[in-house]
Amino acid sequence: MMQFIGGGSQQNYVERTRGLDPSRCLAAGIDVGKYEALCLVADHHGEIVGEPLTFPLTEPGVRALEALFASAATARDAVRVRVGVETAGHYHRTVVARLVAAGHDVVELNPAHVKAARTQQGSRRLKTDLRDAAAIVDLVIRGSGRAPQQRTDALVEQLVWVGVRRRRVLARTALSNQLLGTLDLIFPGLDGCFDDLLGSKVGPVLLHDLADPGRLHRLGVAGLQAFTARRGVRLQRRKAEQLHQAAADALRLPAAERSCRAMVLAADLAVLDLLNNQIDQAEKHLAAVLPDTPAGVLTSLPGVGVVRASNYGAALGDPARFANADRAYRASGLVPASYESAGRTRPGQGISREGNAELRTAIIELGRGLAQRDPDFARYRASVGARMKPLMAAIAVGHRAHRLAFALMRSGEPYDPARLVESVATNGERRTMKAGRPVKKNSREAACRHDVTHPPVTTVPRSSPARKTLTRT
């Protein structure tokens, strides 16, 4: 079996261009900005074809780009033209979609890889759009880059609403912190009466109507209970007494400043209510579209609801684009970083972080939900927590949850706890034997050699004479 340094994507491109005249195989590099982009075309010898083109990110601009492709292909009688586009936030999305729809061979390139290629060309500190485009061309000629991810309409809708909810939650968190800071100046001690003031039932009532310690104190304990009862919230007498005492003990700013800050608090509460409504709306959309996506089966997992399943499904996309769960896990950037030289490894490198940050978060959150509700995952969480740091334990549980979730999405079958217990007890050997494949004695250890979810493989130490040591003098 032929192997390529760049993996399957490089193998696919090399096999399509093998034996062709390099001067008739063209590579186009597009460096995208906010309003315009620059394109450079060269053949596989690296010889530039035509002049670089700067074009606006508009329909006329893309038509001019296609004219450049056509003229370059005619000039070289090209048999292959591949277009590489640097992924620049969201600015590249429209031009990539337009080129893919027109039938062009397009690949996307990581900006970090483009920077590394520019450094190899001796231009690390000489960044220009033209040099970036040249680095993109160099990567395309090597066979680097990945085809743009294609999503169904349901997956696109899921991705959009997951993004909306994530941004609103971040905005709500920031606003909540600001709101509580303002409250500490208006009514010191009120927040300390609750574990989560904003998340409690009586919290919104107090913030909207009783954020003034003087008014709350004048109501008294019985009056406070009656006040909240008229607004549909039952307040225990012990909590009412605690609130009344906090109002009596509260330090107070001058009346003028307190009045101004009360107006700010009211405005922040209005924005907070708006954010909460938008988050609820996003979750309703996610609940409606989830059954039409591969992640719909994940709600059969204990502790995994619409939000966790949607976050994981949106970050992963179509599971069929990954050969197996390990490839998908690698795309998250949760795999351990490694540093090895001259047969020696440097421990404690953490995770690689080279991948999808949203997928990292979704995997860890998936493991957290399963560890809270599933007995087998709870035992596993306790086991790894006894020998690992909390973050490493969370990653280990997340990795186990990811493998289970990925298998469910690929098969489309709901979660079967008995099947999981059997698989764990036999290390998956029963399924392997059913498929007629031999069971390798150390296959599990070999597959998990660099995996934080399992202890390292036992190795035979080298004899003392053969061991290299460093002696300080």
Image (cartoon, helix red, strand yellow):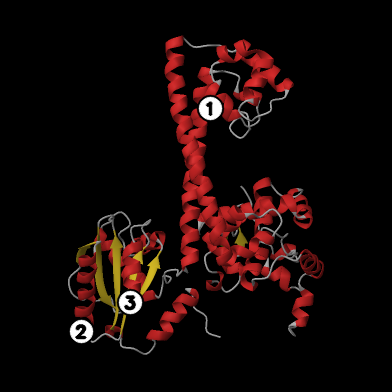
Q: Amino acid at mark 3?
A: His
Residue 424, percent across and down? 78, 66
- 386 relative to 78, above or below: above
- In percent of the image, x 73 and y 83: which residue is there? 437
Please name the residue that numbered disc 2 is placed on. 74
Please name the residue that numbered disc 1 is placed on. 180
Mark 3: which secondary structure? loop
Looking at the image, residue 107 sits to the left or right of residue 356; the answer is: left
Q: Which mark is residue 247?
A: none
Residue 3, percent across and down? 52, 80
- 381 relative to 56, above or below: above
Q: Amino acid at mark 2?
A: Thr
- In percent of the image, x 49 and y 65: which residue is there? 154
- 240 relative to 299, above or below: above
Q: Amino acid at mark 1?
A: Leu
Please name the residue that numbered disc 3 is placed on. 104
Instruction: Give the mark toward the camera: 3 or 2.
Output: 3
